[in-house]
Image (cartoon, grey):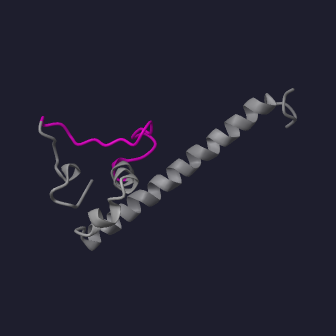
Amino acid sequence: MCDTTDCPAAQTTDEFGRPPSVEHGGLTHSVLGTTGHHLLNRHTRGELPDHLQTWTPAALDRAHADLTAEINRTSRYLAALIDTRYTVITHGVDGVPAR
């Protein structure tokens, strides 16, 4: 998931032989994939520009494609949440908020 060789997320397993995993707050991998989690964590810590300096053009292209897919997926998820909230507020009846 990472192209920076000394980054723990660049390894295929951690020190216990498990696949690397990253999380950002309460978001789960079902919402963001590994690329989004990893880079969002680096961005939040202010490390992303430096972290990407060693990435190859191919790795950057892959990350761009992964992030685009994650943006599309999370946008659909957000739209569904907004629609669900609206239905809850209106109780699904005539579009008028419940009193």
Start-end of magenta stretch: 16-35
Above or below, comparing residue 9 to residue 93 in the picture: below
Q: Give 62 or 5, whichever is nearer the viewer.
A: 5
Above or below, comparing residue 31 to residue 52 in the picture: above
Q: Is residue 22 on the magenta stretch?
A: yes
Q: Which residue is at the far bottom?
A: 57
Residue 31 lies, in percent from the top left, at 46, 42
Q: Give 10 or 58, whichever is nearer the viewer.
A: 10
Residue 20 lies, in percent from the top left, at 23, 43
9 relative position to 67: left or right: left
Question: Which residue is found at the position 88% from the left and 35% from the top?
Answer: 94
Q: Quadrant of residue 99?
A: top right
Q: Quadrant of residue 30?
A: top left
Residue 33 lies, in percent from the top left, at 38, 47
Residue 66 lies, in percent from the top left, at 39, 57
70 relative position to 35: left or right: right
Dominant secondary-structure state across the stretch colored magenta? loop
Question: Which residue is found at the position 39% from the left and 41% from the top?
Answer: 29
